[in-house]
Every structure is written in C-alpha cells, then in structure tokens.
C-alpha cells in the first residue's frame, strides 16, 4: 500500500527502545485516558469511537510521550493520519506534561477468523457449491494486478480503502453489507478484487463468489428457463462471501431484483458477508425496490470520489515503478494535470507512452508526450457532448437528429443510433443509464448491447470500422 498523505512529524515512527517494560498506568494516566474516551466519543460519535479509539491500548508513558498500541499496521496508519493530532491535543489539554503521542503496532498472534461468529456451512454443501460455481463459471476470475499493494490511497478513496481493509482484517464482520460506490474508472473493481484476493489468501476454506451484476442476472434468467431456480438459490446461499460488482445493472429487472433481495436477506441472516459496488449510492439508483434500497444501505456505504492531482501523480509514479520504465517526473506531472477524467484513462495514457518509449528508444520529452497523446489530450481539452455526437452521426448517415431519439427500429436508423451510443460511451464520461436517457429514454442494457454490437461489427468489418473511426476523429479532432 502506498500512502500519498504525509504522516504528522510529531507522531513519528516508533523507536520504543527507551520505553520501559511492564507498564502499569498510574491512576492519573488512566483518568486522563478515560477523559479522552469521553471527549472523543462526543466529538466523533459512537461508531468512530468504537472502530478507532477503543482498540488503542495504553502501552507506556515516558519523557512526555504517551505510547499506545494497535493490533495492525493499517490501523496505526489510519488513526495516525486521521485522529492522531486531535487525540494528542485532547491529551495535552488535560495533562501538559504530555507532548507526544506514539502509536505502535503490537501484533496479537490470533489469526484472522471471520468464522468465529458465523454459522458454518456443511462441507457437503460447500463442495457442491464450489463445483456448481465452477461448472457455471459463475465466479469471475480475479485480476492479479488488482491487489491492495497496488492500490494507491489518497483523500478521494481513503474511506473505501479503509473499509475494505478493515473488512479483511476484522475477526468478526464489522459491517454488512459493504457498499462501495463511485464513478467509472475510479477503482471500484480494483478494490473488490483486492478484497477477494485477501480473503482467499487468509481464508482458503471460504467460498468467495465474485461476479458482476450482469452475470448474476444472466445466470438467473438461465436458471428460470431451465426451471432450476432451486439450485440457483442454493448456490448463492451456500457461499461465505458474495461480491457483486456494478449492482446498478440490476435496477429495473423486477424478477431478478426480487431474487436478489431474497438471496441477499438469506445471506445476511446467515451472517454471510456481502460486498457490493455500484456507480452511484443506493439512494441514487433508480428503479429499485425501496426494500432493496434500504437493505443496501444497511451496513457501510463508502464512496470513491474523483481523483485530485496529488493522487493522480501518486498513481502514475507507482505505475511507472511497476512498469519499470524511465519517464521524467515532468511528464508524469503533465499527465496528472491533463488527464483528469479517471484512473483508467490515466493508465491508458501512461501505457501508451511506455510503449512509445520502448519502440523509439529515445528518452521521453514533454514534446514527445504531447505528440504521442495528441488525440487523447485534445478530447480532454474540449468536452464532447452527446448532442454533438448525435448531430455528427445523423449528418454522416443522412438522418434527422430526431431519429436518434425515436422508437424507429429499422436497421438503417437503428445501426447509426448504435454507432452514436457507442461513441457516446467512448468519448464522454457519461454512464450507460445517462446515455440511454439521451437516446429517447432507452434502457442502459440497450446501450450496453449497442456498444457490444458495434465492437463486434468493427472487428468483423474493416470498412465499417474505418467509418466509425472517421466519425471518432471528426469528433475529437
Ligand atoms: P471502476 O471499477 O471503478 O470502473 P477499476 O477498478 O476498473 O474502476 O479501475 C480502473 C483502472 O484504474 C484499473 O486498472 C485500476 O487498477 C486503476 N486504479 C484505479 N484506482 C486506482 C488506485 N487508487 N491505485 C492504483 N490503480 C488504480
Ligand atoms: Mg468496475
């Protein structure tokens, strides 16, 4: 894990060589600590208190330094960055002999055990579920790059990252479900995979099922057709951790929603962990049942906000190291300034530069960067709108702009409309539902289908691909 944040210097790295052993806090120190408890709880609330202050235990007091311990390095970093300065202030207000707060990690040897408070599923059911999951190819493969150690933390994603880590590190389930939401390309899937990897590593005996909501729906419909919904229910009910990515795709599908809701409730009742991601908060997902909405917000809802410059630069530096390429800082700074839409695009730009540097075998300059990324940078200078795309595409195919919104389904209208949807997805930051709305209130699945269809056609038909490319260049140039 990389931390972009600076640690406070007065909460410095521990050298506890001078700390006395067998510390017995004096009544004064105990009294002080109790007063800090009270004040902290009042200021930050019960939940924060229980998660972050309560786990601290008094370790030592020497030369004005109050030393406290936590069980994990992660907790130390988190408390240090977010609450350390305030805790120290509270201590100083009460006892002016204190001038420093040291947080040390004292690892307890108890291994992670999320089973402690959960009901055990019988091995037979579990074997069955795993076999079934494999057979149905239900659980999606995890990307080996999407691990915690490759996730750069900054202000915008700190909450979701902390929640994810906490879930993995906790003995009992700290919150259920965990709901992570944020815009496209900001790291939701990365975090989901990281959680799945970590659970698999620490709990090989657990059945972790990770899948997209799309896949969930697809499997459900398939089971309905085969009249085998029992097996489907069993399958989900016998997993230990169910992770569903992009849950916004479930909206609007009533029977799937109903099934999801029941599966969801059954799992929570059995103390199974559920982790969900979406492109928006439960409150903002349209077309879902109110019961489902409120159940989704039951646990912890954590967001990922758009990146800031500092985080983008941090991510670029981490990726540069991973790729092992030479790239001047100035180039990275330039990218962090220019490519602000999301991390996926930022990565794309960096990969392109790396490939260029590799082939040309000349050191990268800012000028070369600008040249290599010409099209991309231009599209960022000028925001392309869906209206503009619709206008261009209609023009190109000799249609009326209103055909983009109409219900007409004949191929000569439908195909260009699909091209426009595809371009809207490629060239704007709009989500599928937003694009759907701009095309006469169509469903996001229609947009998704259009994008796939155009991608397929472009692969099959070179002249069609060129056609689309010309349109794209016209829009971005
Ligand atoms: P989302 O699921 O939110 O659309 P992804 O998780 O697919 O986004 O992230 C898009 C790309 O950006 C991935 O390659 C991911 O590794 C990378 N990425 C996003 N956030 C970070 C981060 N904080 N640190 C490192 N890489 C990140
Ligand atoms: Mg994703």
Image (cartoon, rainbow, N blue to C red):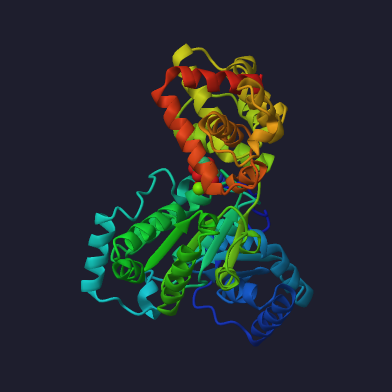
Residue at 36% x, 51% y is 140
Reply above or below: 467 against 403.
above
Between 161 and 463, the residue placed more toward the observer is 463
Q: Can residue 326 be seen in this view?
A: no
Rendered image quadrant of residue 199: bottom left
Rendered image quadrant of residue 418: top right
Residue at 63% x, 22% y is 398
Q: Which residue lies furthest to the bottom in this view?
A: 27
In the picture, measured across the screen, residue 440 lies left or right of residue 142, that is right
Q: Where is residue 128 in the image (x, y as percent from the top left)?
A: 22, 67
In the picture, measured across the screen, residue 218 lies left or right of residue 64, that is left
Q: Where is residue 439 in the image (x, y as percent from the top left)?
A: 64, 41
Reply above or below: 357 against 299.
above
In the picture, measured across the screen, residue 166 lies left or right of residue 308, that is left
Quadrant of the image for the C terminus? top right
Q: Position of residue 460 (x, y in %)?
A: 39, 24
Q: Position of residue 353 (x, y in %)?
A: 53, 23
Residue at 53% x, 34% y is 410
Between 47 and 280, the residue placed more toward the observer is 280
Q: Is residue 444 visible?
A: yes
Between 266 and 127, the residue placed more toward the observer is 266
């Amino acid at each position: 894990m990389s931390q972009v944040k600076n640690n406070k210097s007065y909460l410095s790295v521990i050298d506890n060589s001078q700390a006395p052993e067998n510390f017995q806090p004096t009544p004064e120190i105990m009294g002080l600590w109790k007063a800090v408890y009270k004040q902290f709880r009042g200021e930050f609330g019960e939940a924060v208190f229980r998660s972050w202050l309560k786990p601290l235990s008094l370790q030592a007091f020497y030369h004005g330094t109050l030393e406290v311990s936590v069980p994990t390095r992660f907790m130390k970093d988190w408390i240090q960055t977010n609450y350390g300065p305030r805790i120290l202030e509270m201590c100083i207000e009460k006892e002016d002999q204190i001038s420093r707060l040291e947080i040390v990690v004292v690892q307890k040897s108890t291994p992670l055990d999320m089973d402690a408070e959960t009901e055990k599923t019988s091995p037979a059911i579990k074997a069955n579920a795993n076999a079934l999951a494999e057979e149905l190819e239900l659980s999606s493969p995890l990307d080996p790059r999407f691990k915690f150690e490759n996730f750069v933390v900054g202000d915008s994603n700190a909450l979701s990252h902390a929640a994810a880590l906490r879930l993995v590190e906790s003995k009992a389930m700290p919150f259920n479900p965990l709901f992570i939401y944020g815009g496209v390309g900001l790291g939701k899937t990365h975090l989901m995979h990281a959680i799945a990897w970590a659970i698999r590593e620490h709990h090989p005996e657990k059945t972790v099922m990770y899948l997209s909501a799309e896949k969930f729906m697809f499997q459900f419909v398939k089971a309905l057709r085969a009249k085998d919904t029992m097996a489907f229910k069993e399958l989900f009910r016998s997993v230990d951790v169910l992770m569903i990515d992009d849950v916004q795709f479930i909206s609007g599908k009533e029977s799937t929603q109903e099934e999801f809701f029941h599966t969801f409730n059954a799992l929570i009742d059995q103390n199974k962990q559920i982790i969900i991601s979406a492109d928006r908060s439960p409150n903002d997902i349209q077309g879902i049942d109110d019961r489902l909405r409120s159940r989704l917000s039951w646990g912890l809802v954590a967001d990922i906000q758009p990146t800031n410059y500092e985080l983008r630069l941090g991510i670029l530096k981490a990726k540069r190291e991973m790729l092992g390429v030479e790239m001047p800082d100035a180039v990275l700074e330039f990218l962090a300034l220019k490519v602000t839409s999301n991390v996926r695009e930022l990565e794309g730009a960096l990969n392109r530069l790396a490939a260029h540097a590799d082939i040309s075998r000349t050191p990268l300059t800012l000028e070369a960067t600008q040249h290599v990324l010409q099209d991309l940078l231009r599209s960022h200078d000028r925001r392309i709108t869906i209206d503009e795309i619709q206008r261009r595409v209609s023009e190109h195919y000799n249609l009326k702009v209103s055909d983009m919104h109409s219900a007409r389904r004949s191929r000569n209208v439908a195909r260009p409309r699909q091209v426009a949807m595809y371009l809207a997805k490629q060239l704007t930051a709009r989500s599928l539902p937003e694009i759907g709305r701009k095309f006469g209130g169509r469903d996001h699945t229609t947009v998704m289908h259009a994008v796939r269809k155009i991608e397929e056609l472009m692969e099959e038909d070179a002249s069609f691909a060129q056609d689309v490319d010309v349109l794209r260049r016209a829009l971005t140039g």
